[in-house]
Amino acid sequence: MQTLRAPIAISLAAAALGLAACGSSSSESSSTTTAAPATTTSTTTVASAEGEKVFASNCAQCHTLAAAGSTGEVGPNLDSIAPDEATVNAKVTNGGGGMPAFADVLTEAQIDAVSAYVADSAGK
């Protein structure tokens, strides 16, 4: 009987080690899942940085926007009116009310970026 106990003990030890290894794979899988949102945040940060860059180069001379550190007084104070993204996009694209159209100056991607940036930043 004693000779049977040794192989059983070895088998149980091997099974325990196998289960422990499975547990660490699961932990590694969780850390991989956690890393994915960092990439998404990074992409969002890049898009916001592009919008801020477009604003600084094309809008800050005329508009006040605290997030951009601009104090232009020719156009409306964007912090006061806090326009939504669609409103900014239409105004930047088509102009109006004294503002020139930027459809021939900026790419569609730049207009989208600055529209999102202003909508997310105004009044905050």
Image: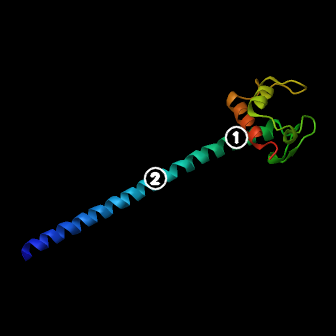
Which residue, given by chain and number where applicable, does mark 2 sit on? Answer: 32
Q: Residue at x 56, y 47 (%)?
A: 39
Q: Nearer the viewer, residue 26 or 5?
A: 5
Q: Residue at x 27, y 62 (%)?
A: 18
Q: Horizontal and vertical percent for residue 121?
A: 77, 43
Q: Position of residue 111 (x, y in %)?
A: 73, 31
> Which residue type carries mark 1?
Glu
Quarter occupied by the N terminus: bottom left
The kind of secondary structure element at disc 1 is helix
Quarter of the rendering containing residue 100: top right
On screen, residue 8 versus residue 68, left or right, reads left
Q: Nearer the viewer, residue 41 or 6?
A: 6
Mark carried by residue 50: 1
In the rendered image, the residue lying farthest to the bottom is: 2
- Mark 2 or mark 1: whose residue is earlier in sequence: 2
Q: How many marks?
A: 2
Q: Position of residue 8 (x, y in %)?
A: 15, 69
**Colouring chosen for the image of the structure:** rainbow
| Left-right relation of 52 to 36 | right
Q: Report whether 111 appears left or right of 13.
A: right
* Spatial separation of the CA atoms under disc 2 and disc 1: 28 Å
